[in-house]
Image (cartoon, rainbow, N blue to C red):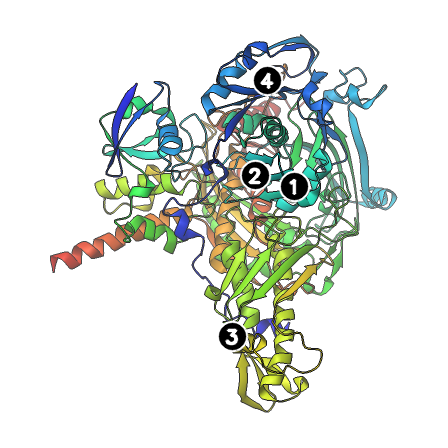
Amino acid sequence: MSETLSSQKAYGPVARKEDARFIRGKGTFVDDIALPGMLHGAVLRSPLAHARILSIDTAAAAAHPMVEAVITGEDLAERGLAWMPTLSADVQSVLATDKVRFQGQEVAFVVARDRYSARDALELISVDYEPLPVVTDARLAIDNGAPVIRDDLGQGRSNRIFDWAAGDKAATDDVFARADVVVSQDMLYPRSHPAPLETCGAIADFDLLTDRLTMWCTTQAPHAHRTLYAMMTRLPEHKIRVISPDIGGGFGNKVPVYPGYLCAIVGSMMTGKPVKWVEDRSENLMSTSFARDYHMHGEIAATSDGQILGMRASVLADHGAFNGAAQPSKFPAGFFHIFTGSYDLKAAYCEVTGVYTNKAPGGVAYSCSFRITEAVYLVERMVDLLARELRLDPAELRMKNLLRPEQFPYTCPTGLEYDSGDYPRALHTALELAGYESLRSEQAERRERGEYMGIGISFFTEGVGAGPKHEMDILGLGMADGADLRVHPTGKVVLAISCQTQGQGHETTFAQIVAAELGLSPDDVEVVHGDTDRTPFGLGTYGSRSTAVSGAAAAVVARKVRDRARLVAAAMMEVSADDLEWDDGAWRVKGDPEQARGIAEIAMAAHSGLDLGPGVEGHLDAITVYNPPNLTFPFGAYICVTDVDPGTGQVIVRRFIAVDDCGVRINPMIVEGQVHRGLADGIGMALMQNITFDTEGNCLGGSLMDYLLPTSVEVPSPELGATVTPSPHHPIGAKGIGESATVGSPAAVVNSVMDALAPLGVKHADMPLTPAAVWCAIQDASKEVEAPDE
Amino acid sequence: MQITLTVNGTEYSRVIEPRLLLIHLIRDELGLTGSHWGCDTSNCGACVVWLDEKPVKSCTVLAAMADGRRVMTVEGMARGARLDPVQEGFARCHGLQCGFCTPGMMLTARWLLDHHPDPSEAEIREALSGQVCRCTGYENIVRSVRWAAEYEASERAADQL
């Protein structure tokens, strides 16, 4: 680490390079691109959640004067593209051939000369459906008598996708049998949607002369998409170029390959012209990957003085109609088994059953690392329920059970190895920032006055930076990231990376990483990304993996350049390379530090006629591939203060205190911006966001009028703090921050509301805590108080 | 039908379908892609432009309704190389991440400061509450607008000297 600590001059709150174009309206998003002769595609979607397709009549649409092609599942079947593999070893219908299995499923694709005509022609397609029984509740879908959704998988298949377990069942049962106290609770982490402000879309441009496909696409993982398009279309991969230009937010939504992308490709192959497809907001909410939808049963065991002994969880995971879960771990429930959280307990066991329902397929890691949000929510709710049972302060109970710094690296009861942490320090920092003691006093005073104020704590451990080969892959692709660093003769450098920014500021942060390693200014470093023809292979941006994996690659490749520069510097100064040391941004002669050469002058020499000595190639360019040895484990302590109106059920989030430890911070301004985002996200999930369905499978969250996203008036001004515990295995000690706040904050909000309502006897209510949900929880609790014998 | 409108000071005449939305006219016909489309239902505000003197959500305005009127988009905010203080504030205060909502946010903020040069944090939040940002949690957007308000106040003070 000493090498790291000496080289951080370029770190700090550097203004973003990206902003110059965005504040002028000069960004380039997929829908901003217009190619000569470009056509427009539109998808016909199923109005029914479960129905057999009897016939599709496209004649009238095809006869529309502006229409150039109408594509159905049968057309795709001729090309072997009616079905596509998902990222979770399932298949998904691209355009339905046999049945539709969720409302909004893709049935046909129209290619027309303009946006409006494509939509008009959808109205001219006639589909004859035979409605089938619908099941949208995972608890009913698993029944033997439930309608079978995936009859395509063969005779005798039920709606059960997988059964998976982690931990030591016997040891956990033993701990529970000996515990003084066991608390259990059912809870739903409701279906949510990442809803980036830019919806998903693509422009496919297939050149009939060269068989070359160029794909502008809203993807968080351009290289993974290229390989997937090659596998699906059987086009040779070197003839495919995926360009992911400016992306208007992703949050996991833009990881998978969606049917619309493939339809655009086929549309371009059929017409020989570029085809643009951009979904509208309802299509985005109703058909692209959702998140969560976990029915969880949690149990926590403890001694009567508050020593937590064990955790059990049993989960029914609703994956919708196709298992399109975009998660690369080798575990079907991602890293849900991190559900022991941040605590030192003796044993834990969880089991997860995946289920098909007549709902949109998924799910994605919505600003989180693969089911860790669900796990954190479960454990943090259970700890609060335990605190209430034991009449202990929830901060005190947590402090008593948090892992201690000397326990790291720590292997949790289900097998994940946490890299580093100082949890008590983070919680102390948050309690101090919040003024916890005085908040509790204020709460007591308010309760005297009949006011309902809540203080909710959440402590989370994330596992990010996908990922180590032994635990992760995407359809067989390991999760290493390449980096390519070119050093021009004048000492300016170009870093090409495989991951893709959707607003995280990679063009700035990655320039800082390289600048720090080479003694340059971030202005001397250009970052190239989002174009598979110009960047090395790697698996993209999600699960907070950019800094954790590509950031590591950037540091490593810069150090390779530095090593090459050392040989050139030795030739320049006519000394042995062994006599040089890197210090303060230059190679210096040991014992004579004034004799030094910086990267710029070394670069010029490396390109010059100077005799560099035997075996020294010249130039300074380098490439690398970084294979993460483990995940990194960011953590944090959050405190949420709410005021609840028991008459209306309205929750006001008054304060939000967040202390994050993401290891070394490269650009603290960008780090804090990421935390701000996640807190808003968590408040949205806890209080507003919900994708629900009626019993016929109609999506009730299909527009932003129904699916409520937090605005500036629901989100308070957050109060942030930081601790820094470097990752011991990351080249610059960084851990990743993109999603910590989304993971950690919902539990703090719900714990706060439950704390506010404790005097009314409310113990638990499921998210989102809308005024109606809170009001009902209060009514239910008062009924229980009135009728204790029931 | 034929319409004539002025966008960022330039007059355009176009023959359009009566159903054409203003956002599509601006983006697809005039090539000004700084204004974005995000939701269809007037909830997100990615499409906010000024119609005459007021911010409107151009996904729910027909292009025909802009006939004979003036439109300002994000591309018209700067005066040559000189950024509007609101644009400057967004860059200085990290008021944007992906940049998709940014044009709409800045245009509403410009209107706010024109009518209310010294808004409180609560007033800024209220003014922007019809628009959605998925990246910033709004905090740095509020700071950006405050920065612009303070900068413009100092400019006014300097003018009076």
Amino acid under disc 1: His
Labels 4, 3: one chain? yes
Q: Residue furthest front?
A: A209
On the image, the x and y values in percent for residue A549 come to 65, 56
Q: Quadrant of residue A260?
A: top right
In the image, what residue occupies the spot 49% across and 55% down? Answer: A670
Check disc 1 and report the residue beneath it: A225
Under circle 1, the secondary element is helix
Amino acid under disc 2: Cys
Check disc 3 and report the residue beneath it: A600
Name the quadrant of the C terminus of chain A. top right
Kindly report the distance in space between the C-alpha atoms of the residues bearing marks 4 and 2.
29 Å
Is residue A78 toward the left or the right of residue A218 in the image?
right
**Contact flag, marks 2 and 1 (Cβ < 8 Å):** yes
Q: Going from the N terminus, do you reach mark 4 or mark 2 first?
A: 2
Amino acid under disc 3: Ala
Chain designation of label 2: A
Check disc 2 and report the residue beneath it: A217
Q: Residues within 10 Å of mark 4 (few under 14, many from 20)?
A: many
Q: Residues within 10 Å of mark 1 (few under 14, many from 20)?
A: many
The correct choice, above or below, for A158 with respect to A205 in the image is above
Q: Quadrant of residue A63?
A: top right
**Contact flag, marks 3 and 1 (Cβ < 8 Å):** no
Q: Going from the N terminus, do you reach mark 1 or mark 4 first?
A: 1
Labels 3, 1: one chain? yes
